[in-house]
Image (spheres, rainbow, N blue to C red):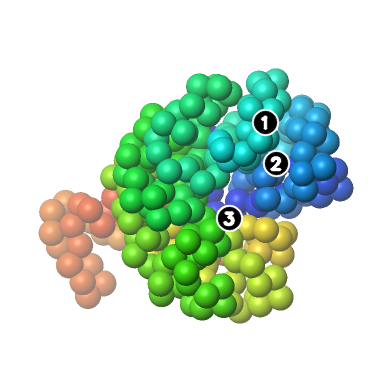
Amino acid sequence: MQLLHSRSLLFLPASNARAIEKVRRLDCDMVILDLEDAVADDKKAEARAALKPAFEEGFGERIGAVRVNATDSGHYLSDCAALKDVAAQIVVLPKVESAREAEGLGDAVGKPVIAMIESPRGVAHAQEIAASDAVAGLFMGNNDLRHDLRIPMNADRSGLMLAMQQVILAARLAGKAVFDGVYNRLEDADGFRAECVEGRNLGFDGKTLIHPNQIGPANDIFGPSEQELAEARALIAAATGGAERFDGRMIEDMHVAQARALLEKAGGA
């Protein structure tokens, strides 16, 4: 399961059979069947019941995940019970504020956990959370974080920068994957692309998505370009060890390792 290589991670309601069927023809790297925000309370049981047949049919080469409701919700224990017979590879836990919460879910369902960091307390404890053996990676939950930080919903992300960088740092210290939060303005394609570029430049591995139209741009931006791949191949071929000059700049073994990692993310291209 190449979580670190995932570029596009699509949420869709577990109660929407049509969307589940459609996603099998889409080019996202991860499918996340949602039991939380995307599902109304009166549809929760229906969504849980849909999980097992959805995962029995499978999602091809895509990573299959389920997002449960938060540990303090009235739905959490029912979600955990439903997941015991579901062949999901990962379970996503929202509103994580301690490693203990993620570990409790991991123990309950026997699956690796992606922890969503959505609150000031979650950001403050991100290193502890990322370091847990139960945690496979981190998601930014920027919508809830904006609310808690009292940042206007239509403001840019400058007020979130410190939090995002802390979460990325926590993931890297633990050697874990980390993914940018969702983009809500579905009609703003240029804004979405700009946020993907910003996210990749910050160090996120990929982006969580809420609409199929966002898959292509996320794959393009979080996946290495042909120019980047060509430069990586040329750098590796030119390197002889130690510090040396390449294409007008100094390179060393670290740059070779970066180039190899880029090629690996592209499937060894």
Marked residue nearer the N-terminal end (1 or 3): 1
Q: CA distance from mark 3 to mark 2?
A: 16 Å
Marked residue nearer the N-terminal end (2 or 1): 2
Could you tell me which residue is drawn at 83 percent across and 36 percent down?
A: 46
Query: For residue 87, which numbered disc appears in the image?
Result: none
Q: Position of residue 109 (x, y in %)?
A: 58, 23
Question: Is 250 placed above or below 93 here?
Answer: below
Query: For residue 79, which numbered disc appears in the image?
Result: 1
Q: Position of residue 119 (x, y in %)?
A: 45, 54
Q: Amino acid at mark 1?
A: Asp
Q: Is residue 68 left or right of residue 241?
A: right
Tell me if mark 2 has few (under 14), some (14-19) or many (20+) residues whose alpha carbon lies within 10 angstroms of its own. many
Question: Is 65 placed above or below 106 here?
Answer: below
Could you tell me which residue is drawn at 33 percent across and 56 percent down?
A: 166
Q: Give SS at disc 3.
A: strand
Could you tell me which residue is drawn at 30 percent across and 60 percent down?
A: 235
Q: Give SS at disc 1.
A: helix
Q: Give SS at disc 2.
A: loop
Question: Is 143 placed above or below 70 here?
Answer: below
Task: Give 5 or 237, whichever is nearer the viewer.
Answer: 5
Query: For residue 208, which numbered disc appears in the image?
Result: 3
| Pointers 2 and 1 in contact (C-beta within 8 Å) | yes
Q: Is residue 37 left or right of residue 46?
A: left
Q: CA distance from mark 1 to mark 3?
A: 21 Å
Task: Give 141 or 258, whichever is nearer the viewer.
Answer: 141
Q: Residue furthest left?
A: 243
Query: For residue 35, which numbered disc appears in the image?
Result: 2
